[in-house]
């Protein structure tokens, strides 16, 4: 039995926020800005690994009629943008990252917006 899509997406969004706003991630991203080798490693083991996994999940939701998506990769970029917003760049520039409760609220809000934007057409 599957977990409800909203629950899974909130978990994904929360994990993205927790990972990308962690002290370790922020330090690695700062270092990667001046190291093409480190940047390539971060992309390979981060975005280029995680993105396709989430895209496959979104494609499954589309196939099951739970979402209307033209392109799972584009849908992931939308999901990512709604989730992360400008929080990572602000943290990279020295602002304090959102607290755990703030990240949880951000995740739930992002998922609600994403679901609204990708809702399948209502059948009459």
Image (cartoon, rainbow, N blue to C red):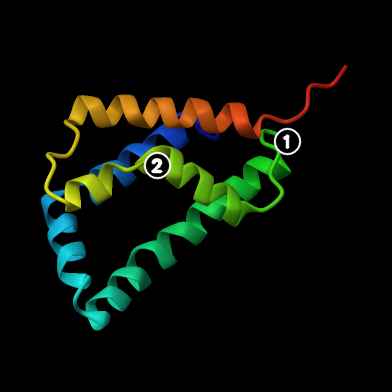
Q: Is residue 51 left or right of residue 68?
A: left
Position of 5 relative to 78 (above/below): above
Rendered residue at 22%/45% (across/down): 90
State the image coordinates of residue 77 (x, y, percent, origin top left): 51, 51
| Residue at the spot of label 1 | 65
Marked residue nearer the N-terminal end (1 or 2): 2
State the image coordinates of residue 60 (x, y, percent, origin top left): 64, 47
Rendered residue at 12%/39% (across/down): 96
Rounded to the nearest angstrom, the CA distance separating label 1 from label 2 is: 20 Å
Q: Is residue 75 left or right of residue 124?
A: left
Rendered residue at 55%/54% (across/down): 55
Quadrant of residue 103 within the rendered picture = top left
Rendered residue at 52%/45% (across/down): 78
> Mark on residue 12?
2
Q: Secondary structure at mark 1?
A: loop
How busy is the neighbourhood of tag 2: few (under 14 within 10 Å), some, or many (20 plus)?
A: some
């Amino acid at each position: 039995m599957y977990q409800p899509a909203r629950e899974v997406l909130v978990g994904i969004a929360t994990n993205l926020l927790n990972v990308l706003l962690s002290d370790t991630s922020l330090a690695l991203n700062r270092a990667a800005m001046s190291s093409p080798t480190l940047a390539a490693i971060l992309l390979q083991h981060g975005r280029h690994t995680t993105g396709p996994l989430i895209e496959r999940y979104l494609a499954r939701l589309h196939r099951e009629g739970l979402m209307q998506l033209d392109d799972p990769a584009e849908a992931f970029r939308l999901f990512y943008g709604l989730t992360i917003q400008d929080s990572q760049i602000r943290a990279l520039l020295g602002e304090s990252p959102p607290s755990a409760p703030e990240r949880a609220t951000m995740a739930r809000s992002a998922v609600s917006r994403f679901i609204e934007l990708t809702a399948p057409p209502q059948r009459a």
